[in-house]
Image (tube, rainbow, N blue to C red):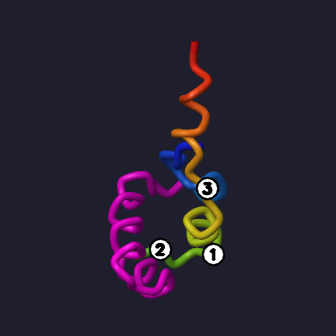
Amino acid sequence: MIIPIRCVTCGKPVAHLWEKYQQDVAGGKKPKAVLDELGLERYCCRTLFLTHVDIIDDVARFKK
């Protein structure tokens, strides 16, 4: 739903990089290049970014 503040596996802070990642990928850069630029070297952090599905807008529709 919302990107975790820290990587679930290694504990590295990653939430502050999420918006930059989204902007660059939407701008046409390849995800691998963006992850390299952001300094995400561990596979656990990279997986977190590559597999994250942002569904907060869908869930927010059902709020009472």
Labelled pair 3, 2 in contact (Cβ < 8 Å): no
SS for dot 3: loop
Taking the view exactly as shown, the residue that stands out farthest to the front is 61
Please, what is the three-letter code of the amino acid marked with disc 3? Val
Q: Residue at x 38, y 83 (%)?
A: 28
Q: Please determine whether, in this image, residue 48 is positioned above or below residue 29.
A: above
Judging by the rendered image, the residue that carries numbered circle 2 is 40
Compute the Cα span from label 3 to label 1: 18 Å
Q: Which residue is mark 3?
A: 53
Q: Nearer the viewer, residue 30 or 33?
A: 30
Kind of element beneath mark 2: loop
Q: Main secondary structure of the magenta part?
A: helix
- Describe residue 39's horizontal placement relative to residue 64 as left or right: left
Extent of the magenta region: 11-37
Q: What whole-number distance in Å separates the C-alpha atoms at marks 2 and 1?
A: 8 Å
Q: Disc 3 or 2, which lies upstream in sequence?
A: 2
Q: In x, y percent, where is residue 62?
A: 62, 24
The image quadrant where one finds the C terminus is top right
Query: Which residue in the protein does label 1 denote?
Result: 43
Q: Is residue 53 magenta?
A: no
Going 55% across and 65% down the picture, which residue do you hit?
49
Quarter of the image where the N terminus is located: top right
